[in-house]
Amino acid sequence: MINNCYLSGFSFHVPQQVMTNKDFEKLVDTTDEWITSRTGIHRRHIAANQSCSDLALQASLQALERSGINPRDLTHILLTTFTPDAYVPNAACILMEKLGVRGIPAMDVNAACTGFIYGIELARAICALHPDSMILLTASEVVTSRINLTDRSTAVLFGDGSGACVIAAKPFSNIPSSCYVTDVLLEADGSLGSLLTVNGGGSAHAMKLGQKVDHNFFVQMEGREVFKHAVRSMREISRKILHKNNLTIDDIDLFIPHQANMRIIESLSKKMQIHPDNIFINVQDYGNTSAASIPIALADAWEKGRISKGDLVMLVAFGGGFTWGAVLVQF
């Protein structure tokens, strides 16, 4: 069975509206200094009357253009998100209609902040079964639609955005922004799911006609516990994928972690002994965009010249569920 998988056309899109820490000072009992010292975040982009599929469309069109692919040439559409436009239809089908495509599989993937990495593994499996596949993988989140802006512990952390790439089993010719997927590792632990939730509206927390929206409809998080598990899980899966491929952290040219907050990134990089020059960070400008975090950072790193031909790049993420995963890609 063919096991080749190539990524191309990295792109990202964020809403025009920006919300700074100073803006939050007007909403909750906080300060710019408090937010910056605890999260490293200075600003985040906020969707204004834009849905998950709206953001996904912009990133997708750019990824397709950069890959030289017409939307009609796609064979699969995968959209990773926990903030879809609706329960039914799924956001991938809505994106499909906006792209003017019909008759191919389109589905959502929900692994919270690890969604894009889970999506890569799913796309890799599709490529193995269908070597002629041309897959659009998009991660898009309107996290602020599920944020209680009066909750200081969560409101300041998140932003909205989308990222996308095109995936195929064959190399993309003459496309500079393309890479080979060397390996993927995924893990999860459902026993820890209660530490990070958005329960409201689910079948176990059904909405009744006339019921007022309560805190269950928004992100709730046990911050200290999430921090501990995030650092430990990303560190361990990074070590596992390196060991599996007979590599050390010194072999990695650029390390791109989930952009959750600066403290998690700094703790992870310290425990893994990653040199500051070899880690990419943009959380200060976008906040935590959940599933879109990794593709936004990957596209941003490419556009800023942080990735060169021949580089070995590691992507690692952690999200609600709990889910976590790591990817090695060779440019």
Image: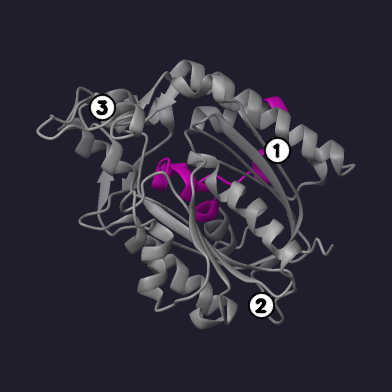
Q: Residues within 10 Å of mark 1 (few under 14, many from 20)?
A: few
Q: Residue at horizontal 43%, vertical 56%?
A: 162
Tell me which amino acid carries mark 2. Ile
- The residue wearing badge 1 is 275
In the rendered image, residue 128 lying in the magenta stretch gets the answer no
Q: Is residue 226 above or below residue 278?
A: above
Can residue 230 be seen by looking at this rendering? Answer: yes
CB under 8 Å between discs 3 and 2? no
Q: For this rendering, which residue is in front, 230 or 38?
A: 230
Q: Residue at horizontal 56%, vertical 81%?
A: 73
Q: Is residue 277 above or below residue 108?
A: above
- The residue wearing badge 3 is 31
C-alpha separation, residue under disc 2 versus residue under disc 1: 29 Å
Magenta region: 271-297
Tell me which amino acid carries mark 3. Thr
Q: Nearer the viewer, mark 2 or mark 1?
A: 2
Drawn side of residue 243 relative to residue 74, left or right: right
- The image quarter containing residue 3 is bottom right
Tell me which amino acid carries mark 1. His
CB under 8 Å between discs 1 and 3? no
- The residue wearing badge 2 is 175
Element class at badge 1: loop
Q: x and y percent of residue 51 in the render?
A: 29, 56
Q: x and y percent of residue 46 in the render?
A: 28, 49
User: Reading the chain from its start, which is encountered first: label 1 or label 3?
Assistant: 3
Element class at badge 2: loop
Disc number placed over residue 178 in the picture, else none: none
Q: Residues within 10 Å of mark 3 (few under 14, many from 20)?
A: some
Drawn side of residue 238 relative to residue 111, left or right: right
C-alpha separation, residue under disc 3 versus residue under disc 2: 45 Å
Q: x and y percent of residue 58 in the render?
A: 39, 68
Q: x and y percent of residue 253 in the render?
A: 74, 50
